[in-house]
Every structure is written in C-alpha cells, then in structure tokens.
Image (tube, grey):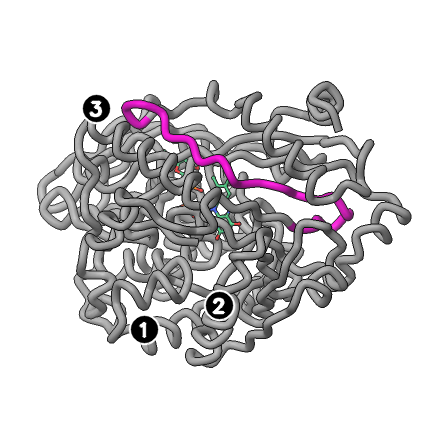
C-alpha cells in the first residue's frame, strides 16, 4: 500500500478512545463542592483508584471514602488501553524472575488469586465488561524470535500456567498473516475485556457500596493537616485521615513519584467493524489477544463488534515528563502503525480506522507497580504499572489499602512491595537516557535481537527492557 493510501486509512478516524466513544457512556459525575470530612480520600478515578475505593468500603463498611477524579472516570490509561487483562503482577513472569526470584512462586499465587477475584467481582457486581477468556498468542514476526518460544513455554509451565508452542504453520492457521514465524499461546493467564466498561462498573459498584465519587475535580494539592491530610480542588476540600494517590503518569501530587515514574506515550488505532468476508480472511476464530515478540511490539485484539484494536510499537517520551491533550495525536506514529497493520494483514487492504488516540503509560525502571509513603505516612502512592495494570491494579489497590492502614500482611512483607525501582535521572539526562534506550531497542530488533553495549549495561543494573 502506498503512503497516501495508508494516511487515508486513518484520516477520518475519530480522535478519541474507542472505549469512551459510546452512546451509553455515563455522564461525568458532579464535581466536589465545599468542605468534606472522610476517613480515606482516593485521588484518581482509573482502575487503581476505583478498586481502592470499592475494596475499602467492602472490607470496612464503616470507613468513609471519597474519590476525586480530575476529569471523568477512565479518562486516563484505564479508558485508553488495549484491554489485555494479564494475571501477572510483575509485568510478565520473566521480569518477575529477574527481580524477585525467591518471591515468584508467592507472587504468581497472588496473581492467580487476584485474577480470579477480578472475574468474581465482575460477576458479583454484574459488570458488562465484555470479558473474554481467550488467552494470549504472541507471534515471532522474524525468524530469530522463534528461538525465544521454548523457554517462554517452559517458564510459564514451571509456574503452573498452560503454555503451548506453535510453529509457523500452526501460528498462521490460528491467525492468517504472512509475518508469522511461530507463536507461544498462553490460554489461561490472560483475558481481554472492555476496560472503560470495567471502570464504569467499578465506579457504580463503589458508589452503591457507599463511596462518594466526584468527577471533574482536579486535586491541586494534598497536604498534612494535623494527624491527617487535606486534599484541595478548585471547588472544595476533603479532610481525611489517609490518602491514596492513584494518579498514574499524570503530574504527581508528591515529589517522590517524579523520581520514579515517567509518562511514556503509547498510541492505538481501531478499525471499523470487519464484515463477514474480512473476518473470514484473517481466521482468528478463537479471538485471542495477540502480540508480537520484538522489543518494540504491537498488541492487538478484536472488540465485541469485531473491530481490530491495534496499538503499541512506538513508545514516546517527551522532554520534562511532557503530558497533555495535545499529545493524544501523533500523525507520524499513526502512519507507522497503519502501515504495519496492513503489512500484517494485507488481505484487509481498504479497511479504514474509526478511532485513533494516545495515552500516557506510567513507566518505572522495574516495569511493575511500586508503592511509597509520603507526608509522614499519611499518603500512599501506587503507580508504575508500565503498561500492564488492567489486572494488577486490583492488587495495587489492596497493597495501598494495607499501607494506609499500617497493616502487616503477606502483601506488605513482599520485597516487591517494600523495594523501590531505580530512580530516573533529572533532565536533560532523563530524556537522553530514555531516548538512547528506545533507539537501542529498535536497533536490537533490526539486528536479530542482539543487544548492544547500552542495553547490556542496563541489563547488568536490572534496567534492561526485554519483551
Ligand atoms: C495506550 C495504553 C495501552 C495500555 N494497554 C494495556 C493493556 O492492554 N493491558 C494492561 O494491563 N495495561 C495496559 N495499559 C496500562 C493500564 O491501562 C493501566 O496500568 C491501568 O488501567 C491502571 O491505571 P491507573 O488507574 O493506575 O491509572 P489511570 O487510568 O491513568 O488513572 C489515573 C487517574 O487519575 C486522574 N488524576 C491524575 N491526577 C489527578 C489529580 N491531581 N486530581 C484528580 N485526578 C487526577 C486522571 O485523570 C486519571 O483518570 C495501557 C496503557 C495505555 C496508556
């Protein structure tokens, strides 16, 4: 396909997340007005904050909870993601093994319990989250990547998950693309869902459990207030005994987060619904969540109405933690993504994209959720999922609740919970290091996975990103 045809394919796409662009999307709730008193204030109405509010009410019904969301529920990553719900709490087993080898059996058991508890909550609260327990199929899109597959299968199986290796023919029989050279199928450790509907459902459940949820209420500051905290918005104040900060990649309310988390922008396209012939032409009858095995990888899945969501590959860090709605659009990335889509599925030439958007990923140097205390222990932050938080956010919220209550639990004893990632350097080094890493990862993909000096140095310090 030529460049003009590629650009035309997304030119008329709505510049907003498909998940939020629904006729039945709930209206944003009322903003905070006046002074309020509560036990726990949660800042952020993404999956982390929503689980924290709901679980806080479920575990201690007499505890009063206020949640403050700056925009609307699921405005951030939770309404912009691919909807892959992985069981992993550690951004994949391999990343967990590299960092907390002794804890991995326990972390994987907790992951399994967390995964089951999310499915249970979806049923119990009757949330129409479009959950499909399809598993995940990851493709080698260059011959050298096929060498990773046997070890991936063995690792998953050693932690009790089902795993299957597929050769090129078997991979293409599942999903029809000329780019596949083999695949690994993980049938029971990943599901796909509609993340915004999950968030809306959790907000409704939290409200009916008694949490007070305010939207359009950006918190401008969280400060000490006697033994507790006070959270301030333009229209009001919430005095609370404790605060949970679930603000992800957004500008942090406490300084510590700034050292550990950077916003890395990731972009997504969604097609129009496929017709019967297009659907037939790609196979994909088992509707698995799909990804590829390169460092710069795509993730893609079918929606309930048979569109293809296609995202990833380009991860963009903007100087000085750049954030804001102007970054939702990135024509160069959309063009790259659209071109790669039609290389993967040439049989879909002529299909158009209906939605395009970007979202900020709360990236930290260990690629999995981290926790910390601020304001003398009155506030707890829970951030840093690095693009794999749809499932782990419930676990993150549980830990944050443990920490706000100063509870000694199995979770709070984990090294994974007690340790912090290596902080990012200040600017301009921060931008330089991240850009260099991104280029080095792209180069490794071009050189059959061979990691250059920079990546090998990062690996030695436990900072190397490896898909
Ligand atoms: C493009 C993209 C694709 C992804 N794909 C996947 C995937 O397929 N699978 C997966 O597991 N994970 C994925 N992720 C990550 C996943 O979406 C998140 O880890 C997960 O949803 C948890 O989000 P959260 O609640 O921590 O943060 P968010 O959903 O970002 O919520 C933070 C909220 O805090 C609010 N906020 C921030 N500051 C303030 C303030 N001062 N006052 C009030 N409110 C404030 C924001 O408005 C926002 O709503 C992806 C992320 C992106 C961006």
Q: Residue at x 26, y 28 (%)?
A: 432
Instruction: Tell me the mark number nearer the camera, choosing from 1 and 2.
Output: 1
Instruction: Tell me the mark number nearer the camera, choosing from 3 and 1.
Output: 3
Residue 36 relative to residue 79: left or right: left
Residue 466 relative to residue 312: left or right: left
Q: Residues within 10 Å of mark 1 (few under 14, many from 20)?
A: many
Pointer 3 residue: 428
In the rendered image, residue 119, in percent from the top left (x then y), is placed at 55, 67
Q: In the rendering, which numbered label is found on residue 91?
A: none
What is the spatial separation of the Cα atoms under label 2 and label 3, in whole angstroms? 40 Å
The segment highlighted magenta reads: 301-321
Q: Residue at x 58, y 40 (%)?
A: 311
SS at mark 3 in the image: loop
Quadrant in which the C terminus is drawn: bottom left
Q: Residue at x 55, y 77 (%)?
A: 162
Q: Residue at x 34, y 42 (%)?
A: 363
Pointer 2 residue: 115
Q: Is residue 42 visible?
A: no
What is the spatial separation of the Cα atoms under label 1 and label 2, in whole angstroms? 16 Å
Q: Is residue 161 visible?
A: yes
Residue 319 relative to residue 312: left or right: left
In the rendered image, residue 116, in percent from the top left (x then y), is placed at 51, 71
Above/below status of 430 relative to 376 = above
Residue 305 among magenta residues: yes
Pointer 1 residue: 104
Q: Earlier in the sequence, mark 1 or mark 2?
A: 1
């Amino acid at each position: 396909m030529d460049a003009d045809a590629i650009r035309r394919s997304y030119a008329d796409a709505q510049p907003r997340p498909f998940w939020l662009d629904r006729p039945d999307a709930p209206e944003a709730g009322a903003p905070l007005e006046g002074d309020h008193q509560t036990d726990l204030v949660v800042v952020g109405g993404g999956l982390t904050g929503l689980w924290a509010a709901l679980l806080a009410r479920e575990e201690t019904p007499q505890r009063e909870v206020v949640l403050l969301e700056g925009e609307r529920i699921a405005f951030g990553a939770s309404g912009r993601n691919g909807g892959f719900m992985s069981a992993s709490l550690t951004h994949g087993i391999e990343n967990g093994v590299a960092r907390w080898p002794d804890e991995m059996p326990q972390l994987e058991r907790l992951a399994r319990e967390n995964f089951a508890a999310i499915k249970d909550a979806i049923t119990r609260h009757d949330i129409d989250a479009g959950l499909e327990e399809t598993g995940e199929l990851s493709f080698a899109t260059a011959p050298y990547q096929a060498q990773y597959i046997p070890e991936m299968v063995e690792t998953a199986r050693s932690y009790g998950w089902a795993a299957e290796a597929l050769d090129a023919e078997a991979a293409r029989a599942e999903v029809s693309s000329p780019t596949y050279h083999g695949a690994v199928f993980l049938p029971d450790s990943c599901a796909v869902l509609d993340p915004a509907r999950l968030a809306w459902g959790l907000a409704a459940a939290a409200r009916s459990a008694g949490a007070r949820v305010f939207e359009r209420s950006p918190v401008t500051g969280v400060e000490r207030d006697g033994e507790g905290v006070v959270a301030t918005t333009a229209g009001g104040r919430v005095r609370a005994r404790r605060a949970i900060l679930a603000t992800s990649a957004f500008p942090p309310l406490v300084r510590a987060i700034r050292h550990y988390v950077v916003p890395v922008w990731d972009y997504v396209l969604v097609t129009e619904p496929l017709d019967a012939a297009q659907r037939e032409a790609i196979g994909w009858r088992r509707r698995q969540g799909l990804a590829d095995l390169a460092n710069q990888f795509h993730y893609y899945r079918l929606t309930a109405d048979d569109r293809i969501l296609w995202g990833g590959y380009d991860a963009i860090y903007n100087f000085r933690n750049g954030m804001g709605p102007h970054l939702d659009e990135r024509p160069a990335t959309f063009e790259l993504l659209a071109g790669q889509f039609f290389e993967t599925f040439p049989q879909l030439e002529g299909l158009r994209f209906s939605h395009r958007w970007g979202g900020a990923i709360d990236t930290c140097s260990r690629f999995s959720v981290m926790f910390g205390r601020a304001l003398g222990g009155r506030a707890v932050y829970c951030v840093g999922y690095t693009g794999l938080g749809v499932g782990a956010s419930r676990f993150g919220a549980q830990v944050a609740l443990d920490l706000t209550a100063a509870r000694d639990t199995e979770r709070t004893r984990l090294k994974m919970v007690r340790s912090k990632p290596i902080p990012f350097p200040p600017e301009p080094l921060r931008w330089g290091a991240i850009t260099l890493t991104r280029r080095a990862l792209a180069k490794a993909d071009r050189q059959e996975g061979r990691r250059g000096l920079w990546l090998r140095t990062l690996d030695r310090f436990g900072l190397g990103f490896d898909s």
